[in-house]
Amino acid sequence: MQRSPSKPDPAWLGRQQKLYTAFVNARLGSREDVPPVRDLFEEIKDGRVLYALLEALAGHSLEAAGKINEPRPGRPWTRIDHVANLTICFRYIHKTTKIVGIGPQDIADGTPTMVLGLLWSLIVFFTARDLGGLEGVAALKAKLLRWCQRRAGGRAAVRDLSTSFADGRAFL
C-alpha cells in the first residue's frame, strides 16, 4: 500500500516533533514566562511560544512588532486570538527572513508540516546569521556544513546538508 503524498509518515513526524520540541525548549530554557513545551503542534497555536522563541533567537524584545495578548481569566481563547498573536510574530518574521506559503492561520491550525517548515526556516536563518553567513548562499552552505560537522562530532558522518540528516542522528 502506498502512502498519500499529503500525509506525512507518522514515525517521521514523531521524530521531527521530538527534535523541534527539544530545540524550542533548549532556546527557551532560561525564560521563566514560558513553561517547557510538551506538545509543540498544540502549544505553538496561540502565538506565545513562537513569540518567546523569536525573542530568544533575535536576542531582543519584539514589542516594536506588537505586544502579545495573554489569556484572561473567565474568557476562553478563540482562534481569532491565536491568529492575532501569530500575526505579530509573522510581522517580525517577514521583516527578518523569507517565509513562503506559511501564514498565521497555518500555525493557528497546528498543521504539523507548516509548523515544522516555519521552525526549520527560522533555525536556518538565525543559525546563518549567528555564523555570519548572510553574504551568499554558497558561503553560507559551506559555513553551515562545517558547523554541522563540528557539532555532530563522531556521532554522525555529515557530508552534505541533505542526505546526511535523513536518519536524524546528526541532530542529536
Image (spheres, rainbow, N blue to C red):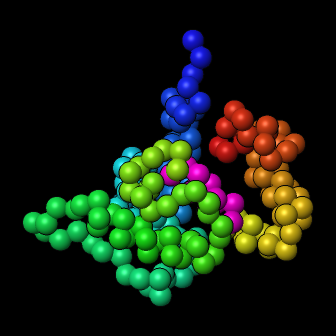
77 sits to left or right of 28: left
* Residue 24 sits above or below residue 59 on the image: above
| Quarter residue 163 falls in | top right
Q: Is residue 95 at least partly visible in the picture? A: yes
Residue at the spot 79% in from the left edge and 72% down from the top edge: 134
Q: Is residue 36 at least partly visible in the picture? A: no
Quadrant of the frame with the N terminus: top right
| Residue 150 on image: x %, y % | 81, 53
136 sits to left or right of 69: right
As rendered, which of 98 and 149 lies closer to the eye? 98
User: Magenta span covers which residues?
Assistant: 115-125
As rendered, which of 31 and 109 lies closer to the eye? 109
Inspect the magenta stretch and tell me whether residue 65 lies in it: no
| Residue 126 on image: x %, y % | 67, 68
Residue at the spot 84% in from the left edge and 58% down from the top edge: 141
Task: Considering the whole magenta stretch, tell me its main secondary structure.
Answer: helix
Inspect the magenta stretch and tell me whether residue 123 lies in it: yes
| Quarter residue 124 falls in | bottom right
* Residue 48 sits above or below residue 38 on the image: below
122 sits to left or right of 74: right
76 sits to left or right of 170: left
Residue at the spot 44% in from the left edge and 56% down from the top edge: 107
